[in-house]
Image (spheres, rainbow, N blue to C red):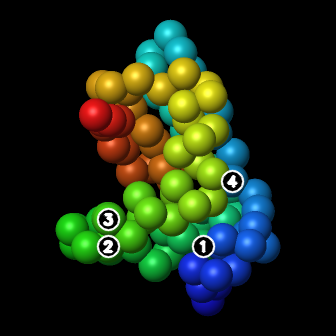
Amino acid sequence: VQNVEEIKKGILKGSYVDADLKYKVFKVTGPAIERLMQRINIGDYESLNYMQLMLDRMGVVKELRKKGVQNGDTIDILGYQFEWFED
């Protein structure tokens, strides 16, 4: 199991963001994402907060922004779909 410090140091690599701008869907995949999602309980609020924190630390959030994600777009992470929302 990888820990937060390893993620911060960039040891975990291999997350990919593909954008389908026609349908406003951003698909996040890769080995690092698979490892992260194995530790996430989608039904638990704290676990989802942890997922968001890790996605940010892994650079996924930055990559989504670079690819043009906007409020209301769909983020697909290994088949789990979330609506993007940012203040």
* Precedes in sequence: disc 2 or disc 4: 4
* Precedes in sequence: disc 4 or disc 3: 4
Q: In the displayed structure, would residue 6 be above or below residue 18?
A: below
Q: How far apart are marks 4 and 1 (CA)?
A: 10 Å
Helix, strand or loop at mark 3: helix
Which residue does the numbered mark 4 point to in the structure image?
A: 15
Amino acid type, label 3? Leu
Image mark for residue 63:
none
The quarter of the picture where the C terminus appears is top left
* Precedes in sequence: disc 2 or disc 1: 1
Residue 35 figure quarter: bottom right
Position of 27 with respect to 41 (left or right) is right
Label 2 neighbour load within 10 Å: few <14, some 14-19, many 20+: some
Which residue does the numbered mark 2 point to in the structure image?
A: 47
Q: Distance between the residues labelled 2 and 1?
A: 14 Å
Image mark for residue 48:
3
Amino acid type, label 4? Ser
The residue that appears at 44% across and 63% down in the rendered structure is: 53
Position of 76 with respect to 18 (left or right) is left
In front of the other: 79 or 64: 64
The residue that appears at 74% across and 73% down in the rendered structure is: 9
Q: Which residue ends up furthest to the top in the rendered image?
A: 22
Label 1 neighbour load within 10 Å: few <14, some 14-19, many 20+: few
